[in-house]
Amino acid sequence: MIGTIIWAIVAGAIIGALGRLVLPGRQNISVWATIGVGIAAALIGGVLAMWLGVGATRGVDWIRHLIQVALAALFVALAARISANRPEPRRVTR
């Protein structure tokens, strides 16, 4: 069980980072948000690929990974847009 969780975090970090690389410009989201987005994209993309019948092949599942990275790019763009609309916290000066 712990191996599955660690694998999900590692795969999420890789897929999230690839999703950020696909997008042009700078995305102002945290590393943790990138990992969370990557985990969500990996899970949803895997289910979508299985539903389309391309989730498990004899070799490397390129189509599944492409779907996951595309979803990660979409989710990173959404997260960046949401975080851009948040007001900055007020700083207390003395």
Image: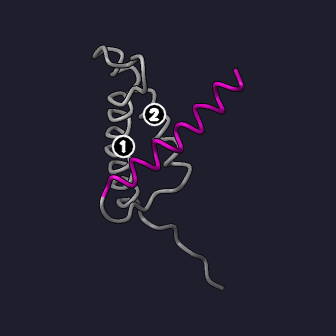
Q: Which mark is residue 40?
A: 2
Amino acid type of the residue tagged 2 in the rendering: Ala
Residue toward you, 50 or 81: 50
Q: Residues within 10 Å of mark 2 (few under 14, many from 20)?
A: many
Q: Dot 1: what SS?
A: helix
| Extreme residue toward the bottom, this view | 94
Q: Residue 43 appears at what percent x and percent y? A: 45, 27
Image quarter (top left, top right, bottom left or bottom right) of the C terminus:
bottom right
Q: Quadrant of residue 23?
A: bottom left
Residue 53: in magenta span? no
Residue at the (34%, 46%) spot, across then down: 73
Image quarter (top left, top right, bottom left or bottom right) of the N terminus:
top right
Q: Quick check: marks 1 and 2 in contact, CB under 8 Å? A: yes
Q: Which residues are magenta?
A: 1-23
Residue at the (57%, 31%) spot, across then down: 8
What is the chief secondary structure element of the magenta stretch?
helix
Q: Quadrant of residue 3?
A: top right
| Extreme residue toward the front, this view | 59
Residue toward you, 35 or 58: 58
Residue toward you, 41 or 85: 41
Amino acid type of the residue tagged 1 in the rendering: Phe
Q: Which residue is mark 1?
A: 75
Is 56 situated left or right of 36 in this image? left
Is 67 situated left or right of 18 in this image? left
Residue at the (37%, 65%) spot, across then down: 26
